[in-house]
Image: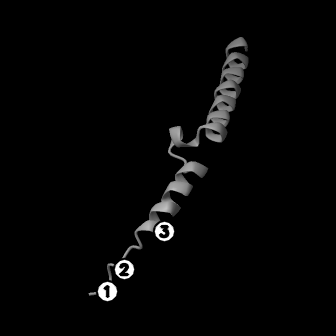
Amino acid sequence: MEVIVGLGIFFILITAVFIAVAVFLPEWLGITGKKAKEVMESHQAENPSKDKTEN
């Protein structure tokens, strides 16, 4: 019984850490954060991409 409770607490702790990292440091987990979106938008504004289907 103690093992099950211990693993449950461990799972909740690890889940809380994951959520905290996802909120505060999303780029570490591969989540596109505000900063990455700003960079992508600024690059699109500088270099308008051509449609590759047009020949």
Front label number (3 vs 1): 3
Considering every residue shown, the one lying at the far bottom of the view is: 55
Residue 7's place in the image compared with 39, above or below, is: above
Q: Nearer the viewer, residue 7 or 17?
A: 17
- Residue at image position (44%, 67%) is 46
- Residue at image position (69%, 19%) is 4
What is the three-letter code of the residue carrying label 1? Answer: Glu
- Residue at image position (42%, 73%) is 48
Answer with left or right where residue 17 lies relative to residue 55: right
Numbered disc 2: secondary structure: loop
Considering every residue shown, the one lying at the far left of the view is: 55
Numbered disc 1: secondary structure: loop
Answer with left or right where residue 16 lies relative to residue 54: right
Nearest to N terminus: mark 3 or mark 1: 3
Pointer 3 local density, CA inside 10 Å: few below 14, some 14–19, many at least 20: few
Q: Are marks 1 and 2 in contact (CB under 8 Å)?
A: yes
Distance between the alpha carbons at the discs numbered 3 and 1: 21 Å
Residue tagged by mark 2?
Answer: 51
Residue tagged by mark 1?
Answer: 54
Residue tagged by mark 3?
Answer: 45
Residue 1's place in the image compared with 43, above or below, is: above
Q: Nearer the viewer, residue 18 or 36?
A: 36
Nearest to N terminus: mark 2 or mark 3: 3
What is the three-letter code of the residue carrying label 2? Answer: Asp
Q: Nearer the viewer, residue 26 or 9?
A: 26
